[in-house]
Amino acid sequence: MTAKILGLELGVARAVGAVTFSMVIGLIMQGLYRREEQERAAARKGFILSGAESRRWGYRRLFALQVAVLVFANWAPASAEDGGAWHLIYAWKWPLTAFAAIGLAVLLAWRFRWAWPPLAATGLMVVALAWLLPQQPVVAFSAGLLGLTLAAALQPGDGEEWLSQTWGFARLVMPLLLGGVLLAGFLLGRPGHDGIIPAEWISAAVGGNALSANFLSALVGAFMYFATLTEVPIVQGLLGAGMGKGPALALLLAGPALSLPNMLVIRGFLGTQKTVVYCSLVVVMATITGLVFGTFYP
Amino acid sequence: MATQPTTPTPLDAASHPLARLRGAIRDNPTELKWLAGIVAVFLLVLFMPVGVPRFDNAVLEGLALLNWYAREHVMLCLVPAFFIAGAIAVFLSKDAIMKYLGPTAPKAVAYGVASVSGSILAVCSCTVLPLFGVFTGAAPAWGQPLPFSIPGRPSMCWPS
């Protein structure tokens, strides 16, 4: 989509940039923290290795099905002429999600030997809600999640452990994420709307290909929260308002990679110092990439 | 009842009020943080320009973004991502993770696996985070999990 709407150059530059980015930043971070890494490797204690050998192949399906549910439930909309397969899947996303979810329930009951009544009850609930409220698939989906939670809670051993780990992540991530989104909205507004920082300031500052334009673009992109695939229309609008191609690329690279909520959460995992290093690296690399690109493709 | 006139205590004596205050500050860092926080929030709300249209609008924008986020992202991508991360933490053997993403894995493999899985799993930027958390816990060579965050979303845009 980037290539189609914003031009082939930007599309290719973005894809190449994104992959290179990740390698380079990963390597730099590793290099910077090599000693600490070694200490961690030496001190690391083992994970709980759960389940017998014979259940090993069940795990792959477990993950595959969960990921399938996630991917299909969030399949991005596309109109019919954009690409046959994509659109077809989009039209069928909920049946596909349901299919994957049923597979998951069956796997849990059969291979992992979970008690089947809670899973069956969940299934019935989801079907009933899907039938009663077909315009609100989120309701049926949420009921499914709730059912899974209960089934896991009632399942001693791996069910309980799974739930407790899941809760651990939720407790760590949710407050930071929600607070971050609120703050991001306050500062920069929703896409297409102003927050406390006026849009004119931003678009006035990112015209041309000056270092400052690229840097500002990368910085704003790093903080701003971009919804899936909304960065392209935003950049389109900004290009129309006079943004240079270099800063546009900087925005495309830094935008999806980071946002204020993301930064807060990452800080929870890596600590403030590493997070600052990481975010700075992203901004710097986005700036440089944008600058270089803008020089060759003004 | 007349009080005895007291001789002034030298500044460095332990019982001097200033020294006691210094000690109290040093011994109670949490209380100090609370105090700082409360004062900061109070000053913030004291001075915030309620009534100025730009400010009011920004507040509404913040709430609007939060509302949109809660509707579109939390149930459908964030919560499933938490479950997946939890499942990784419980079910995935440490050996498998170490084999592909640990410090002894060949760099190309580790980065490759991280990039590809980052692309698939990052359906929305928030799903990457719980997974990132699992891997920073699991793989000591955490340079590898970082690629998750970055190529995930842009690579998802490839097919579109």
Image (cartoon, coloured by chain):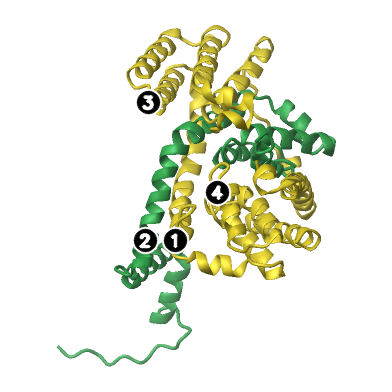
Q: Provide the secondary structure element on which disc 3 rests.
A: loop
Residue tagged 4: A226
Location of mark 2 (residue): B57
Crowd class of label 2 (few under 14; some 14 to 19; many from 20; radius 10 Å): some
- The percent position of residue B48, horizontal first and vertical second, equals 35, 69
Task: Give the vertical position of B160 relative to B50 (above or below).
Answer: above
Which chain is displayed in green in the rendered image? B
Q: Amino acid at mark 4?
A: Phe
User: How far from the left and from the top, in percent, is residue A225?
Assistant: 53, 51
Identified by mark 2, the residue type is Asn
Q: Write down the residue under mark 1.
A: A195
Find the distance from the CA under tag 2 to the CA under tag 3.
Answer: 31 Å
Quadrant of image for the N terminus of chain B: bottom left
Question: Quick one: label 3 or label 1, which is nearer the N terminus?
Answer: 3
> At which x and y percent is residue A157?
52, 18
Mark 3 and mark 1 residues within 8 Å of each other at the beta carbon: no
The chain assigned the colour yellow in the figure is A
A13 displayed left or right of A126: right
Q: Chain of mark 3?
A: A
